[in-house]
Image (cartoon, rainbow, N blue to C red):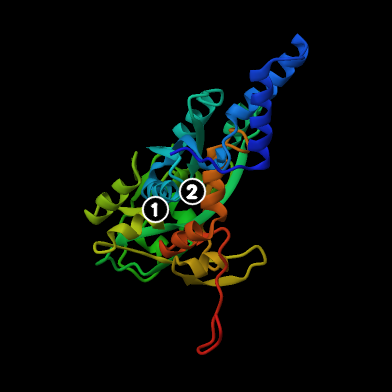
Amino acid sequence: MKNTTNTPLSNFCNGLRQLLSSGGGFSSALVLLVSLIAGGCENSQPGTSRMTSGRLVVAVDEAYAPLFRVLADSFMARTPNAKIEVQEMNPRMAVQYLLDHYNDTTASFAAIIGRQLLPDESEAIAKSNLQPRQYAIAYDGLAVVVPVASPFKQTTREDLVAALRSPSPTTEQIESGVPSAPLSFVIPDQNSSAFALLRQLLPRDSTIVAPARYVSRADSVNTLVADGKGVGVVGWYVAHRDSARLRTLYMGYTDSLGRHHTPARVHPSSLVTDVYPLKQPIVGYTFADVKSVANGFLIAVSKGRESQRYIVEQGLQAENVKLRLVTPGAEE
């Protein structure tokens, strides 16, 4: 049913239409001008925002696709004029997909990945004379994953890095006191967000040389670790979905002042307070117009209270939800 509510804009437009239909006493130039203004009236849809309507395609880091499918469904439920398609792919492909569609007018396009842009990606974007809008959405924790029956309990960031740099690491390098045995890893491949973060932990002149299986999907880490194929390194969001078979190690670290920090588990509170050392940013990017549905969705997931609270409920640190300690009986 058409909305017939009169507004100042609709009254103005109706007056223009009446003038055009009468046609008397107008020069051709004035008729053309009034026609152009009236055309703008025809395109105006009171109550409809481009930020909440239209088609959006979001290329999402495959590790976080389940999370953003839920958030996309929630956004569409609140804004039925928006149609969002979530396409899961590795982060490298997601950034390339965004570049390939920057001038595609069939839809708005966005990418959400579990890291910041890499230098070569930023360079490719700059060479295309593009400036992406960036939205910090949440943080995951990069976790060290073992089977539930494993003797491992905890490690440190420094011990993990040393083991990754060793061609023949042993289990004692991860945690002293455990039975000594050869150590191997299961890691998402070079296109993943987890690999990029691991690579950033190493000195610039070094690389991962420890024995490792590289997998194209983050959830494959869970399967291989549960089967005893190695120690996994993957985002907590992926690891916790298989908590019946796997657990994550507590992790400590030494800060730049030489202070040793007690190992902590991955948790929203340990991420917020930086007690857990391996934080993995989840970031949204788009080249779309500021008033597009791409920006509408990215604003909703990065700043909207409902979306941000849901992110916390999934065990991640939300960018714009702050944790509070509430004393029993105190007013919330």
Q: Where is residue 120? Give x, y as percent.
A: 58, 31
Disc 2 packing (10 Å; few <14; some 14–19; many ≥20): many
Q: Which residue is mark 1?
A: 233
Above or below residue 267? Residue 47 is above
Q: Identity of the amino acid at label 2?
A: Leu
Q: How many marks?
A: 2
Q: Residue visible at 53% across and 40% down?
A: 4
- The numbered mark, 1 or 2, whose residue comes first in the sequence reads 2
Closer to us: 213 or 245: 245
Residue situated furthest top in the rendering: 28
Q: Quadrant of the N terminus?
A: top left
Q: Residue visible at 51% across and 41% down?
A: 3
- Which numbered circle lies on residue 198? 2
The span from disc 1 to disc 2 (Cα, nearest Å) is 9 Å
Q: Where is residue 273? Give x, y as percent.
A: 57, 68
Asked if the residues shown at circle 1 and circle 2 are in contact, with their CB atoms under 8 angstroms apart, the answer is: yes
Q: Identity of the amino acid at label 1?
A: Val
Closer to us: 237 or 287: 287
Q: Secondary structure at mark 2?
A: helix
- Which numbered circle lies on residue 199? none
User: Taking 224 as reference, is 237 left or right?
Assistant: right
Q: Where is residue 176? Give x, y as percent.
A: 40, 68
Q: Where is residue 105? Give x, y as percent.
A: 52, 24
Disc 1 packing (10 Å; few <14; some 14–19; many ≥20): many
Q: Quadrant of the C terminus?
A: bottom right
